[in-house]
Image (cartoon, rainbow, N blue to C red):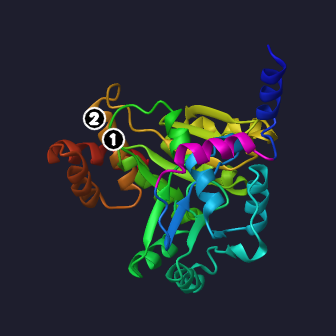
Amino acid sequence: MSSFSRSFETTIGNHILNPSYALALKAAEQATGHQEFPLSSLYVVATPIGNMADITLRALHTLSICDFLACEDTRDTKNLLKNYGIDKPAEAWVAVHQHNESEISPLIINKLAQGARIAFLCDAGTPGISDPGAWLVHAVSIAGFKVVPIPGVSSVTTLISASGLIGISGFIFFGFLSTKSIEREKQIKSFALDPRPTVILEAPHRIEALTKALSLLGERKVTLGRELTKQFEQIITLPANLLHSWLLEDQNHQRGEFVVIVHANDSDTTEPSTSYEDILRILLSELSVKGSVKLAQLLTGAPKNELYELALTLNTKNQM
């Protein structure tokens, strides 16, 4: 292995690249410099979720030519850009976060009206996905200015690509569940009624409560990703009822930001009557027998008499 290869491997492993990032910036300019980057436009830029090497060439060039940088935390973004050799004067930075997004939008629009190129970034990943940005993009669009997406990393698609989802195509992106336990339980019960995979985001201080609540889903597969793209990245797939015990096995399992995917029901190995039973059991915990049967029939298309008999049996068992 050459000395260059050894150096490259070491720096990538520590997630610290050449501070000047001169080669990447040059490559970015050569690859995208001939493309059109119109004035009076808001550039929605995706940034790495952990590994700095995941920045795109187009993002680097966009950040280097924009007149203003609007971001959640100016300190974090300044540090990120310094690693790429991009430095901006103090007046080029604008803080845009969930508490001031609507109030700051007129300022951004005013700068666009003056011909500025403005990049918008969240702390990590793609803006507007459980992060600020949607309101700003809406306001800029309504004002008649161009919004240009600069795509890149997203924690959602990162985990989906490594989760091996099979079965029904498509997925539901739920984001963060309710902080209230009763409401969160209702949300999780709704997942059991939908055959599609569901993607959830969670913070480290709430992951234990989430995994405990997910045990309601029994043996339905769940993929959990933590520290995605970072040195201690971990991706595991377990039945929902075993996830909580896995989390408690090691304190490190509770560190980092989390993405959780509730897999689709395995329609190839589950008998129809078994899936009807699962649905009815959940409905009966909230509704009458009649109401449960009516909703189950709408969801499954199963014969009403079959569902009614099954509901009566389950209801009798619940009362014993």
Residue found at x 53% / y 64%: 43
Q: Secondary structure at mark 2?
A: helix
Label 1 near label 2: C-beta < 8 Å?
A: yes
| Quarter of the view holding residue 100 | bottom right
Q: Is residue 304 left or right of residue 227?
A: left
Q: Is residue 11 left or right of residue 227?
A: right
Residue found at x 28% / y 48%: 312
Q: Residues within 10 Å of mark 1 (few under 14, many from 20)?
A: some
Tell me the residue that label 2 is attached to: 273
Magenta residues, start to end: 20-35
Q: Position of residue 150 (x, y in %)?
A: 51, 55
| Front residue of this view, candidates 190 and 261 | 261
Quarter holding the N terminus is top right
Q: Is residue 172 left or right of residue 130?
A: left
Q: Examine the rendering and report whether any part of residue 156 can be seen.
A: yes
Q: Position of residue 259 (x, y in %)?
A: 59, 47
Q: Position of residue 56 (x, y in %)?
A: 59, 45
Q: Position of residue 38 (x, y in %)?
A: 47, 65
Q: Residue 147: within the magenta?
A: no
Residue type at tag 2? Ser
| Front residue of this view, candidates 80 and 313 | 80
